[in-house]
Image (cartoon, grey):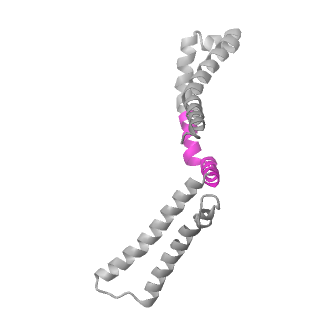
């Protein structure tokens, strides 16, 4: 943990800067520069935005909904976010492992509940069903015993 302290600090600094401070500074800078270098020098624009305060209010009234819609579209309506997530999973073995573990648990729970329901009805499991459960257990056992974060074995079990 001590070896990673510098990198962790750097990561927290970048997140704090890019998520909060850079956004605020960029917004203030953009509003100031566009008003005082562009709008003040053009009488037509100056008529639309007589004061800096009115300019800020108008831009915020238009910009906040527009940027919120753009963010929504990024996450919900375009393939951009899905591509980012694919890259994140490809480059971060912990993310891939988490996804694979979840898939394995779901598959195993589905099969187990199917058999529990059957046994609850006092029905016997057929030899094929027992073999299916043993094969599933072996598949997961083989996978978990051979995988490491370095060999990227989890990628083979990722859902397509």
Near-viewer residue (89 or 73)? 89
* Range of residues picked out in magenta: 67-91
Q: Position of residue 73 (x, y in %)?
A: 57, 43
As displayed, is residue 66 above or below residue 158?
above
Q: Assign the C terminus to one quadrant of the image.
A: bottom right
Q: Quadrant of residue 121?
A: bottom left
Q: Position of residue 77 (x, y in %)?
A: 57, 48
Residue at point 64% right, 54% down?
A: 90
As displayed, is residue 58 above or below residue 142?
above
As displayed, is residue 32 above or below residue 68?
above
In this view of the protein, can residue 66 be seen by the observer? Answer: no
Is 80 included in the stretch rendered in magenta?
Answer: yes
Near-viewer residue (130 or 71)? 130
Residue at point 55% right, 37% down?
A: 69
Q: Quadrant of residue 95?
A: bottom right
In this view of the protein, can residue 15 be seen by the observer? Answer: yes
Q: Position of residue 6 (x, y in %)?
A: 59, 35
Q: Position of residue 84 (x, y in %)?
A: 62, 48
Q: Assign the N terminus to one quadrant of the image.
A: top right
Residue at point 66% right, 11% down?
A: 36
Is 87 included in the stretch rendered in magenta?
Answer: yes
Near-viewer residue (114 or 11)? 11
Looking at the image, residue 150 sits to the left or right of residue 112; the answer is right
Residue at point 56% right, 25% down?
A: 21
Looking at the image, residue 112 sits to the left or right of residue 46; the answer is left
As displayed, is residue 110 above or below residue 91?
below
Could you tell me what secondary structure mostly forms the magenta stretch? helix
Residue that lies at the very extreme toward the bottom in this rendered image: 127
Near-viewer residue (143 or 67)? 143
């Amino acid at each position: 943990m001590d070896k990673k302290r510098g990198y962790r600090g750097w990561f927290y600094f970048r997140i704090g800067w890019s998520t909060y401070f850079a956004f605020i500074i960029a917004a203030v800078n953009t509003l100031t520069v566009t008003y005082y270098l562009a709008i003040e020098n053009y009488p037509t624009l100056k008529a639309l935005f007589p004061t800096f305060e009115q300019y800020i209010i108008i831009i915020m009234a238009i910009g906040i909904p527009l940027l919120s819609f753009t963010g929504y579209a990024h996450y919900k309506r375009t393939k951009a976010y899905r591509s980012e997530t694919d890259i994140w999973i490809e480059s971060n073995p912990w993310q891939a492992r988490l996804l694979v573990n979840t898939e394995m648990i779901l598959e195993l729970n589905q099969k187990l509940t199917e058999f529990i329901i059957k046994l609850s009805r006092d029905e016997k499991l057929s030899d094929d069903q027992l073999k299916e459960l043993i094969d599933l257990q072996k598949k997961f056992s083989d996978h978990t015993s051979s995988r490491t974060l370095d060999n990227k074995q989890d990628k083979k079990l990722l859902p397509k």
